[in-house]
Amino acid sequence: MGCTSGGIGSFIGNPCELAMVRLSADAQVPAAERRGYKNAIDCIMRIVKEEGVTALWTGATPTVLRAMLLSSSVLGCYSEAKEILVKTAPSIFVSVGSTPTMFAGTTIASFIANVVCCPFDVIKSRIQTMPKPESGQPPRYSGMVDCLLKSTRQEGTMVLYRGFTPAFVKLAPYTIISLMVVDKITIAITGKSGF
């Protein structure tokens, strides 16, 4: 369920994700190389005008795969982490429904999800920010696999984990809050953990 909903949501939201990535990347390149977007709406409108409507889904494959992996790994790891914590340290983690267990479980799940998803994030961002090719020239990357191969050949495999720490710092609080709230509400209503 988490895998499917994550994939559908990210496909629908890809134009906004693309605009966010391009706006961020635009600020980091020399002035002569900037696309000069004013804001997210301007970015989306210019992509449609200059590149066509389908360009709004540039990088959709790694974006969707990343979201599917993120949703499924977070949800799957969360319940497993809670069970393991309760078994290995019952004096600290007294039950799967206790706040310390939930907090530690979501932190572990966030870390594992970030390990799984970071390569897709790097590939997605590289595809979404590649410069427009000169007339008659091929794009820098022909797709996700080409981007993966070129990036790792040129920069080594650790390039796939560039930005790991900021991504974890962004993901962990969101995951901790959302899963703990849902879990606490589920416990209040049903009397047992929802995950």
Image (cartoon, rainbow, N blue to C red):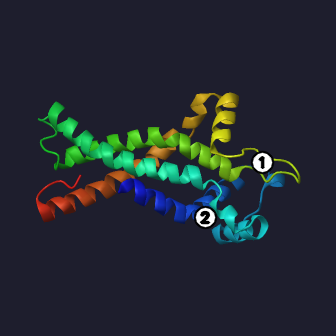
90, above or below 195, in the image: above
Q: Quadrant of residue 152?
A: top right
Total numbered labels placed on residues in the image: 2
Q: Report the residue at 76% width, 71% height from top.
A: 49
* Mark 1 surroundings: few (<14), some (14-19) or many (≥20) residues within 10 A: few
Report if residue 38 is visible in the image.
no
Quick one: quadrant of the N terminus? Answer: bottom left
The residue where tag 2 is placed is 15
Residue occupying image coordinates x 68% and y 39%: 146
Residue bearing mark 1: 139
Q: Quadrant of residue 15?
A: bottom right
Marks 1 and 2: CB-CB under 8 Å? no
Give the class, few, some or many, for how many residues have Cα within 10 Å of label 2's Cα (few <14, many ≥20). Answer: many
Say which residue appears at 88% left-offset and 54% top-offset: 135
> Residue at (12%, 35%) from the top-left corner?
90
Specify the amino acid type for callout 2.
Pro
Residue 32 position within the rendered picture, expressed as x and y whole percent measured from the top left: 84, 53
Residue type at mark 1?
Pro
Residue 63, given in percent of the width and then of the height, sits at: 55, 53
Q: Is residue 127 above or below residue 93?
A: below
Q: In the displayed structure, does residue 70 sit left or right of residue 133?
A: left
Q: Position of residue 64 (x, y in %)?
A: 52, 54
Give left or right: position of 5 versus 103.
Answer: right
